[in-house]
Image (cartoon, coloured by chain):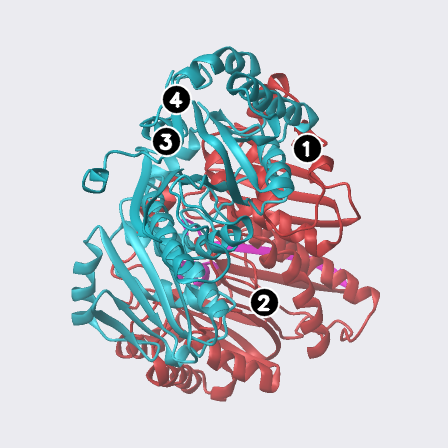
Chain colours: A cyan, B red
Amino acid sequence: MDSKNNPTRFEVPGFLAGGIPSGIKKNRGKDLALIYSETPAVTAAVFTQNSVKAAPVLVSMERVERQHLSQAVVVNSGSANACTGSVGLDDARFVARLVARELNIDENLVLVASTGVIGKRLPVDTISSNIPQLVRNSRQDGILSAAEAIMTTDTCPKVVLKKEIIGDKEITICGLAKGAGMIMPKMATMLSFILTDTAIEAETLKKVFCENIGYSFNSITIDGETSTNDMALVLANGRAGNPIISGPSRDLEQFGRLLGEVLVNLARMIVKDGEGATKFVEISVMNARDDRDAREAAFSVANSSLVKTAFFGEDCNWGRIVSAIGSSGANIDPEKINVSFDDVILVRNGVGLGDEAERRANKVLGREEFKVLIDLNCGSGKARVFTTDLSSEYIEINANYRT
Amino acid sequence: MDSKNNPTRFEVPGFLAGGIPSGIKKNRGKDLALIYSETPAVTAAVFTQNSVKAAPVLVSMERVERQHLSQAVVVNSGSANACTGSVGLDDARFVARLVARELNIDENLVLVASTGVIGKRLPVDTISSNIPQLVRNSRQDGILSAAEAIMTTDTCPKVVLKKEIIGDKEITICGLAKGAGMIMPKMATMLSFILTDTAIEAETLKKVFCENIGYSFNSITIDGETSTNDMALVLANGRAGNPIISGPSRDLEQFGRLLGEVLVNLARMIVKDGEGATKFVEISVMNARDDRDAREAAFSVANSSLVKTAFFGEDCNWGRIVSAIGSSGANIDPEKINVSFDDVILVRNGVGLGDEAERRANKVLGREEFKVLIDLNCGSGKARVFTTDLSSEYIEINANYRT
């Protein structure tokens, strides 16, 4: 109960977790993580929409779709096990089998995830010799350590925990994630694991998870890239003892809101820690013809290199925003567009409001976090996307990622 | 005739051109250009597909579509005259009217183009006081000077000239262009003016021009942006005296090939001079399900920030290429993808070929110009796109564009 007032105690009843350095990463950092539920947990998942899917994605997809149940997730950073052919699939299953043996559970209840460089074979010998230690090291308070072990170019681990009373029982939802680059919609575009002790039926969990992914991980962008390895999992072990949530109800609404808060917080953390990011920007589009158009316009602005470099330079070049809206494919009337930065209106009916407005807007751009509000005045569609600026540091990180 | 052996003499019979500094650009560089045909010229044009179109685009579109004939083009750099409302349209027409008066021609035969910062009103007083000088300064050998005056962040003027005999007559095609940033398909995405003395009928000119735009200006990308001001014009004044080209014929084939060479050369020059570019890369996709899929895959690779930063870092991170193909939307089989850098094959059937292949590929990446060949092995569609790397200098240029 008191962990509610102590946000650094990341624990979920019935879950153990941990992370260790196993030697995959050249810098000897933590690179192997385990999440383990003492009892099999109802599981839902969302996977990358990239046609090129990494081996661990294919293996985990198959297992989750077959039984909607899992008990452990083993994750490595430093190697993506993507574009590795049938050998890669064998490697992913082999690692899962070793973990299952060590935990003495069914190997089909073990899911796998990987992140890192594409195209290198997973160092299975290194990993397998470290699995006994990985299992021994897993503890109730090991979630933060697991979050550290899944990082690549992330500068900090990302963990969010929320507690609330549902059906007279305290339930906990804790999410951990990694992001940094290759962050775009069309699904999770990173690794994220949500652990909860809530009792909830599989189809209901899947539905509420997918809905909330749309407003969180599918509404962020750093560089418009969609990775081969993206995966978001939710494991619900029912340990809280609440009346099982199944189908529409007030409990489901409450659980959905809480899950949404965890996911949106993780999404914000991922964008804030985007490669080279110095700004956190919310792009809000309203009164589009429909939600789809709103989303297209918002993402076109959020992904525009010219808009993002102007954010980095703190230059209120609103013309680039209007141009990005115009080339988005959304159905718009150029003469009805209004644009504001926080509370400063800059463009009305498609025309700039002059130097004084720009001076005020430049002050907003000096902030680390601000909103761009775009009113298209042609319907009631809306969308909200989180993005960053594009800085010289992004180039440096990505020009030398593998060296 | 001897200008064939002297590529620096950029002249087309019957055309005068010139460029002067008029005070629009803060740095006092040339910023006002005129192209003038001694007789009205058959004209075809392609305009930006951005829904937000600058005033000069709207004015020129209307005039070209009405009569397929023009006699002069006045172009300014330093101000885009975009997002300027009805005042912007009046300004564009006013400038055209002044030029028409000075040249003593019908104002509807004057086209206008602008490039520069969006959202500022065109400095019409500055421009109008300089028009008499602009007209006086126009000469047969003034094309290079006009090419200088339309530059923004370009580091060099871009002019290409070709001569050939068609129907017993020597014909000349000369193109001038500006590019640098905001370079993506969906049309010209820059300013380009093609001048020729060929005698050709309007519909035929339009058709052959549009076809060749597809393989040139619509097959390049620097940053995936589509500007509000893009325009490509071709003016044919018939001065060569060749039998008029009308409909399919060997003369049309020859003219089309020559026009294509001029456009592709200009397109290559634009990409090579892309903002901050240090590499020129041709992305060639073959054996896609169809040409459309090939184009989607090629552009997804050519626009990927991660692929482009890896080019800049000379890191043969082929996994990013395979990932970009996978997220392109093209229908592919991941296990059939082959990837080569020039003559070095790196990926076969979706799997990397190992360290020795990567070492050889890294040498290719050290070149200033190379090809990425992608074989999808699932059809006969093909596409070829020119792109650049993404360097720290791109960020610097665009973070501080207006300051």
Horizontally, is A294 left or right of B353 in the view? left
The local crowd at label 3, few if under 14, some if 14 to 19, many if 20 or more residues have their Cα within 10 Å, is many
Q: CA distance from mark 4 to mark 2?
A: 73 Å
**Residue at the image point whose x is 83% and y is 68% from the top:** B249
N-terminal of the pair, mark 1 or mark 2, is 2
Q: Quadrant of the N terminus of chain A?
A: top left
Q: CA distance from mark 4 to mark 1?
A: 36 Å
Residue under label 3, please give it. A147
Q: Which mark is residue B195?
A: 2
Is residue B153 in view from this perspective?
no
Residue extending farthest right:
B249
Q: Taking A327 as reference, is A129 above or below it?
A: above
Of residue A111 and residue B341, the one placed in the foreground of this image is A111
**Residue at the image point whose x is 56% and y is 39% from the top:** A69
Of residue B26 and residue B384, the one placed in the foreground of this image is B384
Of residue A334 and residue A229, the one placed in the foreground of this image is A229
* Chain of the residue that carries numbered disc 4 in the rendered image: A
What amino acid is found at the position of numbered circle 1 in the picture? Gly
* Chain of the residue that carries numbered disc 3 in the rendered image: A
Quarter residue A83 falls in: top right
